[in-house]
Image (spheres, rainbow, N blue to C red):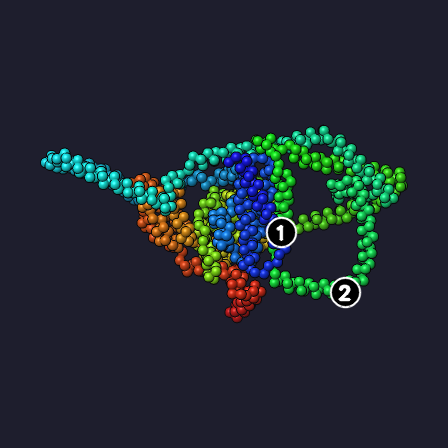
Amino acid sequence: MSNAMYDKIWHQAQEALSVLLDKESQKMIEPQRNQVFIFETLATFYIKYVQIFRNLENVYDQIIHPQKRILIRKVLDGVMGRVLELKNEMVELELTEFHYFDDILQDLKLTPQQLDIPIPKYFLKEKLEVIKGREKILAQILADSGIDPSKVKYSLKSIPLDEAVKLIQIAERARQGRLRALFMKQIFLQEYKAKQSKMLGKKVMDPWAAALRIQKAWRGFYECKNTEKLREKEMIFLGMTPPPLFNEVSATVIQAEKVDRLRNEVQIKHEEDYREALVTIKNDLKLMEGVDIKENLQDQIRHWFIECRNLTGTFPDYPDIEEGGSAIIFSNKTTQQVIEDIIAKQEEEEKNEKRKKKKKEKQPKKAKKQKKGKKEKNKEEDEEWKMSPSVFLPAMKEGNNTYKDIWMNKDESWNFSQDYDPELIKEEKRRELESEIRVQVDELMRQELKNLKLAVDREREHPEKARKKEVSKGKKGKKKEKKAKKDKDLTADRTIESLYKELVEEGLLIQALKVNLSDYIGEYSYLGTTLRQVAIEPMPSLLDVRQLITLYGIWPLGSAAVHEKAPLVKSLLLVGPSGVGKKMLVHAICTETGANLFNLSSSNIAGKYPGKNGPQMMLHAVFKVARQLQPSVVWIEDTEKTFYKRVPSVEKMNEPKRLKKHLPKILKLLKPEDRILIVGTTQRPFDAELQSFCKVYQKIILVPRPDYASRYVLWKQIIERNGGVVTGALNVSCLAKVTDGFTQGHIVQAVKGVLTDQRIRRQTYKPLTAVEFIMAITSMNPVYKEEEESFKNWYAKTPLGKKRALAITGGSTEKAKDSGKKKEKKEKKEKKKK
């Protein structure tokens, strides 16, 4: 794709964004009461923002103009944050993490695939060298400590003499058996050839009859092949089967990939040129225009002194450096405008004094009216719903305005190579240079003002004020220091490198598996809205889960700007049966964002950092390294063990509940600027104390077993990825129906078991069939409906699950809290009686 094409996509995305921003500003004012209409408006905005994000992300990845990329990045972060805000509003409105947009997608004429949320490529591109360096250090530490996973060490065990003799005998007998089989095969072939020669010798067929027989066989074979071809063509024409070479990568795709790589190289080169130009152009401006700027500023400030003296009778007070110096007075203003402002201020001060006197008399009466007014307003606000204000809208509007002012109608016919624009740099650097020179000018003019005051007005300085300011500053500084001392650093004498090495050697900082989120295969739930209309709560699809991982895990960890302002998600819990891909999702978050992975599972920390202060020291070291080398993911596998109701006698020695008290405290210490995510995975959430469990984990995601559509896609893709060829002989639909209840883990295990090297080689003359995979999967235990229902019932007891259940039945959240408190009181009374 050419530069012009990407520019066109950018312009279209910006136009769509400006239309959407105008609509959103209107909707924020309009109050609504109908919940269905509110959800539709939120969902429509969400879908449209996702479409804009997809286009902008593609443009940002491929466009090579460095100054355009800076603006696109700003808007991109804003759109990303707005999507997260809308998602949060939809969750609060519907009281569920999963939403279905079937009807809205139909109205907008979009497919569910277009709703898939992409992961920005710049997450990894911009810190590729840092990630590679970190991986090398990690591998080196593992190698030095002898825990290198790449070098597998085989331990040689001594075998008793009797067993060794038996092993040699088995091997020798097998060798002799193979030789005997070869010998017997040769004898059989000789006998078969002898029989054939005797048969041919006795019966001599007529050449015409032989020719007819050959013709008959050939014509039959030819017609069979013809009919097969015709049937294939018909099926391709009807759209029932894909055309040949459908799955093969075409030459155009390969060429496009090459162009993408070349564009990335040009992008880096233009970025470097732009950075160099920022320095060189600024130096040139300093030499050429620096003296003129200084003189103009001095003249401007002197004129202000004289005019103020003429109007007020005294020289003005010069603003301090902390306040911003003369920049406050002359911010985009001429000297005449400044003088007009001084006159206007004097008039306002006089009016304000008169108003204050009148207000003092009428204050008690107004207060009563205000109280009544507030009560009435509160009632109305409870009934009506308004869209909550956004943190990201100002940034998007600012970006959109700069696009309209600079890039919308800009003539770039001279810039075919799409290099930096020197005029824009000059404008930016001129402002920077002016602010730097202004600081120097302010120092000179302050002194000049003092001299003028002493010479003309004989006004003396008041050093007491300055001293008071210094004292107050000192006090403020001391207060801040005291606050900072409260957070004790337990490892103040240790470097980050030494702590990093210690955590790797202890096995708390592990190497994440290279798994992309796109490898988590699945399909959309196409009947979600229909089922909800009939009051049936559908199980989420695998792609719904994948989207939530992107929104709650990958986006905030990948972008610091988004993490600081978007609704903060500190912890995430993945709940589901064994084999549904919970661990894979954890590793995918790390791979897509380049995050460090810390393993604080109860089995992994058993016996490490013993003593009373051991867990505190361990967590301090983990989170100190995690903050310094962010983004970071803290993974707690089988997290229900940390919150056990009753610890099994087998696990009492491991002390699985060591972190139970410390985790809530650490969550409170995590701030928006800390890109750290705590992720827990569990397949038995029923064993944990629900209250403490839900206090630690902010977002709970139920990971289901795959439905029919997901199983169909899984079977097909996993077979192809493991070297299998899907032909007409393999009925994938039948295979997907029969394996209802089996998870992704089961499917992968079955495919790997069937597709051995020998079976892959035999595919050409013996294609794969569904029976082979069914035979392999029969020995495995599926996830039954009862188990799935138990997960659903457990989720209904969580805070969000309770709210959702009450909302469906027509209750309120307050009732849920009351009922929960009553249950707790009853349980406590029963325990006391026992």
Q: Secondary structure at mark 2?
A: helix
Measured as percent of width and height from the top left, residue 325 is found at: 76, 41
Residue furthest bottom in the image: 833
Q: Is residue 102 left or right of residue 565?
A: left
Position of residue 573 measured from the top left corner of the image (x, y, whole percent): 51, 53
Residue 619 visible in the current orientation: no
Q: Nearer the viewer, residue 240 or 237?
A: 237
The residue that label 2 is drawn on is 365
Please report whichever mark, 2 or 1, sits nearer to the chain's N-terminal start: 1
Name which residue type carries label 2: Lys
Residue 416 seen by the camera: yes
Label 2 and label 1: CA atoms lie apart by 36 Å
Where residue 597 appears, x then y in whole percent?
A: 52, 45
The residue drawn where x is 48% and y is 60% is 533
Q: Badge 1: few (under 14), some or many (20 or more) residues near its Cα, within 10 Å?
A: few
Q: Which residue is mark 1?
A: 25
Of residues 653 and 334, the one nearer the viewer is 334
Q: Residue at x 58, y 51 (%)?
A: 85
Q: Marks 2 and 1: which is nearer the front?
A: 1
The amino acid sitting under disc 1 is Ser
Residue visible at 53% across and 69% down in the picture: 826
Side of 439 relative to 519 (left or right): right
Dot 2 alpha-carbon crowd within 10 angstroms: few under 14, some 14 to 19, many 20 or more: few
Give the quadrant of residue 292. Answer: top right
Using the image, determine if residue 794 lies above or below residue 671.
below
| Front residue of this view, candidates 605 and 816 | 816
